[in-house]
Image: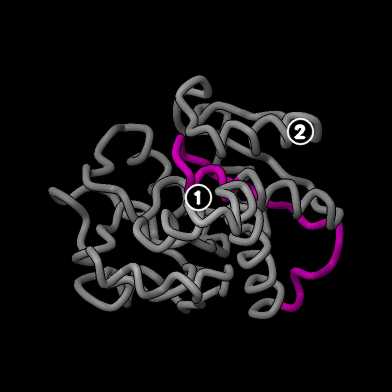
Amino acid sequence: MRAVEGAAIESGAVTGLQLMERAGAGVLEAVFATWPDLAQAGARAVVLCGPGNNGGDGFVVARLLHAHGWKVALHLFGDPDALTPDAAENARRWAGLGATLPPDALTPEALAQAQLVVDALFGTGLTRPLDAPVFQRLARMLDDARPRVVAVDIASGLSADTGLPPAGGVVIPADMTVSFHRPKRGHVTGQGPERSGKLVIADIGLEPWAGHADDV
């Protein structure tokens, strides 16, 4: 995916921001197609963003949900000053609509009241375990509240190569995973099938550069 996305961006045909926008729109389309009851305005979402481009996708999803009339609480698990450039731009766009909250502002009550939780914490580039207390607390609260969870690209905590959590860290299970362009090995191996829920592949316009994956 890095090779394909890099080739697409280097071609000048698309920017990283445009791919991020397409990814966020693909997540929303899959959510409404899978759960038509969520297409109504006025529902509540909790969006969990990490510091990388996966988190940037989450900022896009939050903005699109807000435009659809949802009440959105967005929590950033990371340093806002350390966001990747495209994620930082989408964080800026979100800032005109709502607050960016810290992890410790997330409560069990908020999760229990949410019709949807968006896991945009960590994507396919994760190589370290999610073993910090903040992620252990999050996993416990989600297990207790049992909201519908959609993962952006891959359930946070899973390796996209093996479908296993690195070094036995926490995994955030999803009811649905929306990935982009192609399934990843981690969706179908190890714990991937049971942790990913329904797998939906969204087309974000990368097919012309698909052959660049052969160069990796």
Boundaries of the magenta span:
36-58
Q: Amino acid at mark 2?
A: Gly
Q: Mark 1: which amino acid? A: Ala
Mark 1 element type: strand
Looking at this view, is 78 or 184 the one in front?
184
Q: Is residue 159 left or right of residue 172?
A: left
Q: Residue at x 28, y 33 (%)?
A: 132
Please identify the quadrant where the N terminus is shown: bottom left
The image quarter containing residue 39 is: bottom right
Residue 119 or 5: which is nearer the viewer? Answer: 5
The residue under label 1 is: 120
Queried whether the magenta region covers residue 55, the answer comes back as yes
Task: Estimate the x, y position of residue 198 in percent, counting from the top left.
Answer: 47, 79
- Density class for disc 2 (Cα within 10 Å; few <14, some 14-19, many ≥20) is some
210 shown above or below 137 = below
Which mark identifies residue 17?
none
Q: Eyeballing the image, is 200 above or below 20?
A: below
For residue 1, say whether it is visible.
Answer: yes
Residue at the image position 25 percent from the left and 58 percent from the top: 159
Vertical position of residue 104 compared to residue 14: above or below: above
For disc 1, the neighbor class at 10 Å (few under 14, some 14 to 19, many from 20) is many
- Residue drawn at (84%, 57%), measured in percent from left and top? 68
At a point 47% along the width and 68% down the height, the residue shown is 179
Which residue is identified by label 2?
98
* Quarter occupied by residue 29: bottom right
Query: Gap in Å between the C-alphas at discs 2 and 1?
Result: 17 Å
